[in-house]
């Protein structure tokens, strides 16, 4: 990894890459310093005044003096003299330790990911664990992003200095393996250094609790309070104990592969597995370390790893953003699939908790499934195979988030299963699994953003196991229905036709944050009466926990924790959700339209009609 100074000699300085946006498109730029006026100006333009408020100036003054290292102090002074806008954005607030951890652009300053912010987060976590008298070990993994190994090692040292044993992966590994490791080794907590699918300029810090799931109340708030109490690097313990930092035992990863084999729904010798040709791209992330082996161990013999994207590389040199939800990130894999006439493509994000899937359409062209479609196909396959094998579905359940397709609920109803809703984020599904332990057994869950989980050995979305089962679903669909596309059409004929869209409005910087807050306030205080010709009949405000029926004024509860989400239901069955992202500077709009179908319905003709309906709704919303 390219660095200007050593990790030991420079506590806070890290070589980073920064970026700019132009009309919501990333402008690729590289720099060896923690800030760059040219590369940041477009995303920092929201701050038009060079006058700093007192709190911002106090933070700047603090970082210009010891105990901050000399490199960091120099860069702060340089920003102060050459680009006050960049300085303001790096110091106007502190990078928030949210309910899951940290995520932000790498660079110098309290509003950036660096060794100081990682140190504060880790000391706060250690303080909270010690206040709860939780003794034992913490597991740490990291992905392929720039500076991930340094951040992981830094966290391990601080934890050891606070009296904890640390299991640190010696090489990059997927997030789901970390969740599994926490449970397998009975750790009190876990950490993954990753920014998931964010652009290359970002890194992050996710915290897991002893159940293997991400933080939930009250622990999230408790840790946040401890992190906020860290006001100086001098409060971070640095006298680490090397012998307390250990590699994760090999049997843990072996146990994970055994779990994958146990969750498999088709025999290893199934002929469809041997004939299924698959192109897999890890998008320069951790997927390359486990997915090819997982597919091979379950019987898939024609797996082609895309060579141009197989190297773990935090610059993600072949993609604008390493997000399998985006078409251009999957283009190279699709091109390879066309060259070798592969049946399907798979792509995973850097920490391998999300997986995208492409299949052949009726004309033989590769098309990408969205997350709602993949989740529906996967869960229908799992339930059908359980029923075919005579396995009881009694006291079992599936789960989804409130923004995920209602098709999953329809499928669950057909199999006489409950389908529970949670807030957005797999931590809530993990919490649901934990709350129902000993009462009901989790089968699978999904969210629209390409995240799926099968079984309860892992407590976060798992692209490794999901990749195996999606490939099994495809092999089964080819044998039973002729193709995955025809199976999807049959689902729509059986359960009803759903079409969903997701639109994100990027709002960078402090100005953007205020704009997002204003949009949400408008929905709460002056909601629309109709949208695209259809009357609003119900409004759910997950922040207040209240559902209002417009017609008769009756109110009910969402029965979910508070979250900054607004949902509108229209009289034609349309569901619209507005939700500010918790990890990126954007507000997301989820729109779902649906209609009843029969066996005679021309699915793909109606699909186009529903696309026109989505367009009309987008225009009405101004998105």
Image (tube, rainbow, N blue to C red):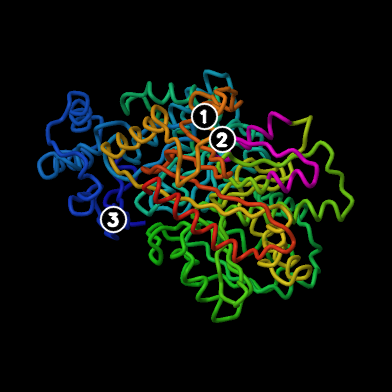
Q: Is residue 52 visible?
A: yes
Cα separation, mark 3 vs mark 1, equals 31 Å
- Which residue is outermost to the left? 81
Tell whether 301 sits left or right of 313: right
Find disc 1 in the rendering and name its residue.
Answer: 542
Tell whether 245 sits left or right of 462: left
Along the viewing direction, whichever of 178 and 416 lies nearer the viewer? 416
**Which one is earlier in the sequence, the residue at label 2 or at label 3?**
3
Q: Is residue 319 above or below residue 617?
A: below
Q: Residue at horizontal 36%, vertical 36%?
A: 519
Q: Which mark is residue 616?
A: none
**Which one is earlier in the sequence, the residue at label 1 or at label 2?**
2
Tell whether 278 sits left or right of 56: right
Please say whether residue 417 is one of the residues in the magenta stretch: yes
Cα separation, mark 1 vs mark 2, equals 9 Å
Residue 157, x across and y down, in percent: 45, 36
Q: Is residue 318 above or below residue 618?
A: below
Find disc 3 in the rendering and name its residue.
Answer: 23
Residue 360, x across and y down, in percent: 61, 72
Find disc 2 in the rendering and name its residue.
Answer: 423
Quarter where residue 87 is shown? top left
């Amino acid at each position: 990894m390219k660095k200007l100074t050593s990790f030991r000699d420079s506590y806070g300085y890290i070589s980073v890459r920064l970026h700019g946006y132009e009309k919501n498109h990333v402008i690729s730029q590289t720099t060896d310093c923690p800030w760059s006026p040219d590369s940041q100006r477009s995303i920092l333009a929201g701050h038009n005044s060079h006058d700093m408020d007192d709190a911002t100036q106090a933070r700047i003054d603090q970082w210009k003096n010891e105990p901050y290292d000399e490199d960091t102090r120099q860069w702060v002074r340089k920003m102060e003299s050459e680009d006050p806008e960049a300085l303001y954005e790096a110091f106007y607030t502190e990078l928030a330790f949210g309910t899951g951890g940290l995520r932000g652009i790498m660079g110098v300053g309290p509003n950036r990911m660096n060794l100081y912010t990682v140190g504060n987060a880790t000391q706060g976590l250690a303080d909270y664990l010690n206040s709860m008298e939780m003794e034992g070990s913490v597991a740490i993994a990291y992905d392929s992003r720039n500076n991930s190994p340094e951040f992981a090692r830094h966290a391990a040292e601080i934890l050891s200095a606070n009296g904890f044993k640390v299991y640190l992966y010696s090489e990059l590994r997927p997030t789901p393996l970390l969740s599994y490791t926490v449970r397998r080794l009975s750790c009190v907590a876990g950490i993954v250094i990753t920014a998931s699918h964010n652009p290359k300029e970002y890194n992050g810090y996710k915290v897991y609790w002893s159940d293997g799931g991400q933080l939930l109340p009250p622990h999230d708030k408790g840790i946040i309070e401890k992190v906020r109490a860290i006001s100086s690097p001098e409060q971070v313990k640095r006298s680490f104990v090397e012998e307390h930092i250990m590699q994760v035992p090999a049997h843990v990863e072996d146990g994970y592969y055994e779990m994958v084999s146990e969750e498999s729904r088709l025999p290893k010798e199934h002929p469809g597995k041997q004939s299924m040709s698959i192109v897999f791209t890890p998008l320069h992330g951790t997927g390359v370390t486990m997915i090819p082996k997982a597919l091979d161990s379950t019987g898939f013999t024609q797996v082609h790893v895309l060579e141009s994207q197989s190297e773990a590389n935090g610059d993600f040199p072949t993609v604008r953003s390493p997000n399998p939800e985006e078409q251009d990130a999957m283009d190279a894999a699709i091109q390879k699939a066309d060259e070798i006439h592969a049946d399907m493509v798979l792509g995973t994000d850097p920490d391998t908790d999300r997986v995208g899937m492409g299949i052949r359409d009726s004309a033989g062209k590769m098309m990408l499934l969205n997350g709602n479609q993949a989740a529906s196909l996967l869960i229908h396959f799992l339930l059908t195979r359980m029923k075919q094998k005579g396995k009881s579905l009694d006291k079992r359940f599936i789960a989804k988030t409130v923004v995920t397709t209602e098709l999953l609920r329809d499928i669950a109803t057909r199999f006489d299963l409950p389908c529970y809703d949670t807030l957005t984020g797999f931590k809530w599904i993990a919490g649901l699994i934990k709350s129902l332990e000993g009462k009901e057994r989790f089968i699978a869950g999904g969210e629209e953003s390409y995240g799926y989980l099968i079984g309860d050995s892992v407590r976060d979305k798992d692209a490794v196991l999901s990749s195996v089962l999606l490939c099994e679903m495809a092999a089964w669909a080819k044998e039973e229905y002729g193709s995955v596309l025809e199976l999807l059409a049959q689902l729509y004929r059986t359960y009803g036709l759903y079409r969903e869209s997701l639109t994100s409005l990027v709002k960078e910087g402090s100005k953007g944050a205020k704009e997002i807050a204003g949009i949400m306030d408008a929905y709460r205080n002056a909601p629309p009466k109709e949208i695209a010709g259809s009357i609003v009949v119900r409004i759910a405000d997950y922040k207040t926990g209240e559902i209002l029926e417009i017609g008769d004024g009756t109110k009910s509860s969402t029965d979910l924790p508070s979250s900054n989400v607004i949902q509108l239901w229209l009289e034609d069955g349309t569901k619209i959700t507005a939700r500010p992202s918790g990890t990126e500077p954007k507000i997301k709009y989820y729109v779902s339209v649906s209609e009843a179908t029969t066996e005679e319905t021309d699915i793909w003709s109606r699909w186009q009609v529903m696309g026109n309906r989505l367009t009309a709704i987008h225009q009405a919303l101004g998105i």
